[in-house]
Amino acid sequence: MNSNIIIIGGGASALMLASLLPKNTATIIESNAKLGAKIGISGGGKCNITNTLMGAEYYHGDKTFIRPALKAFNERALLTWLERQNLLPVLRKETQYFCQNSAQELLDIFLKESKKQHILCSERVLEVSKKDDIFYVKTTKGIHTASKIVVASGGLSFPKIGASAIGYEIAKSFGHSVVKTAPALVGFTVQKEQFFFKEMSGVSCEVEIKVGDEVCNGALLFAHKGMSGPAVLDASLYWEKGHIEINFLPNFSWSSIKGSKKQISTLFSLPKRVTKAFLIQLRLEDKPFHLYTSKELEKLKTLSSYCFAPAGTFGYGKAEVTKGGVETSQVDARSMQSHKDKGLYFLGEVLNVTGRLGGYNFQWAFSSAYSCAKYITKKGEIK
């Protein structure tokens, strides 16, 4: 089949691009039986679309590459576009925009808009080659040709819904470097010394986590495999190997309890179950604070700077996204076109750009798609 543009993948960035391009200009090739599988399950089915706090600082990757796309199509432009499609996202958790009822609302818009393009589902891309300015896409069902190829195949997260490495393989075949990938926005498994975390499974508390130069605030959820929760998921974005430091008592002042005669388990804002578990691990007695010796107090204060090395993560099966990907220095920041080969584009998660929890990865998918569509159509503002 001949097409002007072939879009590899049927996720968020692919569907936004298909929606923005003129009618009958593109063919979407998706390995799943349906488009937008990951959209449907994101945010627990509620779909966190974007965030009022938007900027390159909320992303892991080259900030100078990220900024132009976010500026060209920011969160306000996205909300305006969605409003024109009769979707009015609701603000929750102070800064995060979600679908009103379910992710299906967003998916329905894309399914409607993408119908103006040709769609091929249940067809897996095997390889892409190029000869005489024509791209040849070999799939499980045949060979397709196009003058432009857009790789929007996502990362390795959620293998159960068809995630694959095809985007990275295509990039490498055209001479692109691929930054080592890893699960991100995912929980941590723990070492033997932290196995007591598992005894608190289901309990959560507010924490501050330091990973290198980054600080992640929010809830930590103790889990049967280790720990999860928003703060932990964000921390996983920056963790490679080695230690992290957790402050289990953020915004707590030790001087405020000086001389207190209350039991230590009643003085902290932590759930008592958590405080008592740490006291056992620190081999400290739950007694009135003023009875603690200076040595005991020193051990107790490790709750404000608990340092340890996670054993690993829960893996791609539990990861929201994949960090790493196509090296962005080899891609044009304003068009998403490859510097290696004219007519080859990369969008969304397949690139080495990963956002924090809170709608940042969807925003990147949509912003990168917008930049690509604007460049390809060369008509300025796309309506």
Image (cartoon, rainbow, N blue to C red):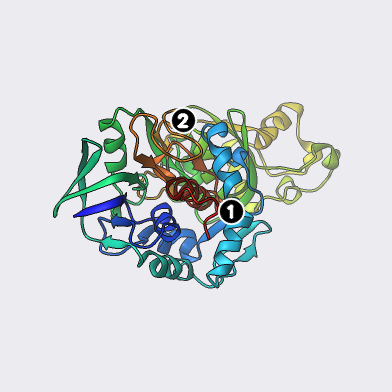
Q: Position of residue 75 (x, y in %)?
A: 61, 54
**In this picture, residue 42 sits left or right of residue 230:** left
Q: Which callout, 2 or 1, points at the residue further toward the start of the chain?
A: 1
Q: Position of residue 111 (x, y in %)?
A: 38, 67
Instruction: Tell which of 137 and 200 is nearer to you.
Output: 137
Counting every numbered tag in the picture gives: 2
For badge 1, the amino acid type reads Ser
Classify the position of the N terminus by image quarter.
bottom left
Instruction: Tell which of 289 and 351 is nearer to you.
Output: 351
On the question of residue 118 being in view, the answer is yes
List the residue tagged with mark 1.
204
Say which quarter of the image contains residue 277. Answer: top right
Q: At x 34% / y 29%, what residue is drawn?
A: 176
Q: Which mark is residue 240?
A: 2
Label 1 crowd (10 A; few <14 / some 14-19 / many >=20): some
Q: Secondary structure at mark 1?
A: strand
